[in-house]
């Protein structure tokens, strides 16, 4: 049941991700805004002394109109530019009451009601200095009515460089998270055959780190500089925030904190994807923009952190403090503080720079938990290597390197083993006792190894070779004909003759017998083995007689 849930969860998550990006692509190609501006190609001080007025406007999208007034500063060279960033605001710019710039969604857009995040740029020529600039903004959402843009005046290149340097710490943390996320995914993929289960699921942590880093990158002012005309860009951070919840929940589930509540985490995964699907449909049908339902995601994040804390405290109370729990109780509060601080900034002050504390907290969480998971993987790999070493010793004969009697019994007793069309061949070495008595047991061991090599060289490509003990060997062949088996026996006899010619010190002899499973007389493969064993002893007797006659 759990396997089906994991399979269908992955399919639904993949469908949801595809749906998200189909919406983005659709808006990317169809969504447009009206924009007109006196633009020149060049174009730094921060304007702080301006007149500001706020009006109630029933016809405005959020019922609020904001106006900013300041004079045009000195224009040196050909021209200078007024540059400012707005998010979810319709913007109109006037110079001496003459409209020179505006940006707002075009009529007929089927998705959304916002121009998104926009870097507004207006160039001024010589002769316009001293003119009054009036910037009018209409916030699209009520939550944006307290946001005031920062106005820059000067060379466009210097302004961009200033913004880039301001956001460089956050961008650096994002790139670190992306690199770590890729490293974690590749590391687990590379070692997925070495361990059956990695506690915490390192690939989920890596996916979460990548998605959260991309969320912050696409929500930064730099992203809007790189994609100045892509007004669907504002949807991407919200999509990524939705998508990031699922790998985070699956990672927490894999930590086995609150094992009895694993089904509860499955419910959380379904609920998270359900919320993402509903908010996406609301965006598609132009009922509510993703920005208007962002509070639901924030509530989801807070609820998940609270649930995780609650389950961790429950585990500590009923099962005691473990090393992993102690680590999480130290690291997770850092994430919680970062998230709470950024939400406070988002809902109270200018939100353009929000997200830094959250991404910093998530980066610390990713680094510490990722390194701890890698340590756990290494320990599991070490245990696996030791287990394989012990299995090698338990299922293999130390003298010859062939599988032993235990390996034979384990294989033939498996439920999936079928004796149909199986041939069992048994072997016994002649003159081993004579070799031990005359030349010593060291030579006897060499004799056993040489016979084992001949049997292996002859049959290993069509069957499994076993040393059953002492001087007894067998080969189990599946889907092989009796004719093929007979030919291989002749090849083995030729190899024995060649060996005796090279080393006549002690004459080698391998007696053999073989037969195919017959369900009319055999209940299992052991009955077939007994019939092959009888044929082997008959041949051994004949070989002894031939040897005595010579």
Image (tube, rainbow, N blue to C red):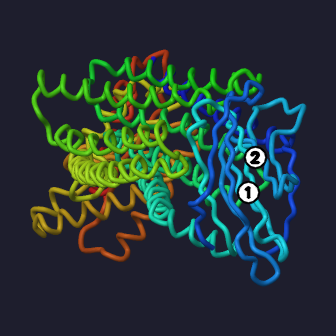
Using the numbered discs, state the Cα–Cα distance from disc 1 to disc 2 in whole angstroms: 8 Å
Residue at x 79% of width, y 52% of height: 93
Tell me if mark 1 has few (under 14), some (14-19) or many (20+) residues whose alpha carbon lies within 10 angstroms of its own: many
Residue extending farthest to the bottom is 77
Circles 1, 2 touching at the beta carbon (< 8 Å): yes
Count every numbered label the image shows and give the total.
Answer: 2
| x 65%, y 45%: residue | 87
> Who is closer to the viewer here, 440 or 333?
333
Indicate whether 146 appears above or below 221: above
Q: Is residue 495 visible?
A: yes
Choose between 375 and 351: the one closer to the eye.
351
Question: Where is residue 121 drawn, in percent x and y?
Answer: 75, 61
Circle on res. 91: 2
Residue under label 1: 120
Q: Position of residue 455 (x, y in %)?
A: 39, 55
Q: Tag 2, which secondary structure?
A: strand
450 above or below 465?
A: below
Mark toward the start of the polypeptide (1 vs 2): 2
Any part of residue 486 in sight: no
Camera-nearest residue between 313 and 381: 313
| Image quadrant assignment for residue 49 | bottom right
Q: The C terminus is located in which quarter?
A: bottom left
Q: Quadrant of residue 11?
A: top right
- Residue 348 appears at what percent x and percent y? 46, 38
Front-most of 81 and 483? Answer: 81
Residue at image location 62% in from the left, 60% down from the top: 222
């Amino acid at each position: 049941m759990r396997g089906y849930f994991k399979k269908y969860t992955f399919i639904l998550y993949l469908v949801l991700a595809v749906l998200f990006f189909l919406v983005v692509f659709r808006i990317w190609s169809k969504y447009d805004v009206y924009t007109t501006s006196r633009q020149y190609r060049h174009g730094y001080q921060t304007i702080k002394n301006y007149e500001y007025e706020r009006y109630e406007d029933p016809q405005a999208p959020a019922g609020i109109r904001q106006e900013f007034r300041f004079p045009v500063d000195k224009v040196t060279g050909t021209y200078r530019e007024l540059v400012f960033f707005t998010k979810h605001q319709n913007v109109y710019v006037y110079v001496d009451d003459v409209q020179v710039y505006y940006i707002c969604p075009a009529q007929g857009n089927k998705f959304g009601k916002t121009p998104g995040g926009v870097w507004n740029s207006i160039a001024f020529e010589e002769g316009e200095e001293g003119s009054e600039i009036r910037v009018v903004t209409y916030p699209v959402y009520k939550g944006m009515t307290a946001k005031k843009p920062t106005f820059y005046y000067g060379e466009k290149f210097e302004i961009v460089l200033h913004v880039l340097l301001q956001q460089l710490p956050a961008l650096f943390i994002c790139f670190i998270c992306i690199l770590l996320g890729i490293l974690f995914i590749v590391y687990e993929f590379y070692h997925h055959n070495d361990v059956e289960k990695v506690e915490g699921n390192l690939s989920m942590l890596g996916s979460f780190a990548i998605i959260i880093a991309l969320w912050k990158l696409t929500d930064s002012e730099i992203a809007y500089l790189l994609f100045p005309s892509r007004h669907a860009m504002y949807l991407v951070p919200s999509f990524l925030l939705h998508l990031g919840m699922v790998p985070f929940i699956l990672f927490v589930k894999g930590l086995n904190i609150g094992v009895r509540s694993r089904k509860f985490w499955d419910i959380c995964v379904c609920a998270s994807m359900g919320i993402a699907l509903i908010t996406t449909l609301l965006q598609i049908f132009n009922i509510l923009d993703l920005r208007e339902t962002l509070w639901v995601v924030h509530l989801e994040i807070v609820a998940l952190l609270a649930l995780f804390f609650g389950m961790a405290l429950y585990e500590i109370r009923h099962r005691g403090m473990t090393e992993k729990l102690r680590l999480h109780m130290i690291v997770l509060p850092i994430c919680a503080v970062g998230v709470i601080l950024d939400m406070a900034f988002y809902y109270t002050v200018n939100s353009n720079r929000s997200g830094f504390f959250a991404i910093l907290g998530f980066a610390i969480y990713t680094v510490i938990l990722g390194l701890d998971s890698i340590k756990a993987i290494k320990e599991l790999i070490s245990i696996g290597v030791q287990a394989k070493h012990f299995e090698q010793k338990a299922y293999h004969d130390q003298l010859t390197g062939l599988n032993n009697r235990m390996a034979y019994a384990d294989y033939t007793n498996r439920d999936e083993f079928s004796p149909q069309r199986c041939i069992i061949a048994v072997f016994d070495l002649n003159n081993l006792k004579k070799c031990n008595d005359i030349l010593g047991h060291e030579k006897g061991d060499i004799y056993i190894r040489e016979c084992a090599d001949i049997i292996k060289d002859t049959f290993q490509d069509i069957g499994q070779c076993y040393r059953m003990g002492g001087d007894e060997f067998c080969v189990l062949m599946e889907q092989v004909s009796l004719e093929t088996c007979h030919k291989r026996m002749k090849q083995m006899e030729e190899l024995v003759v060649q060996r005796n010619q090279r080393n006549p010190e002690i004459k080698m002899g391998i007696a053999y017998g073989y037969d195919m499973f017959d369900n009319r007389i055999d209940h299992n493969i052991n009955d077939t083995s007994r019939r092959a064993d009888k044929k082997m002893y008959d041949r051994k007797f004949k070989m002894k007689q031939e040897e005595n006659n010579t």
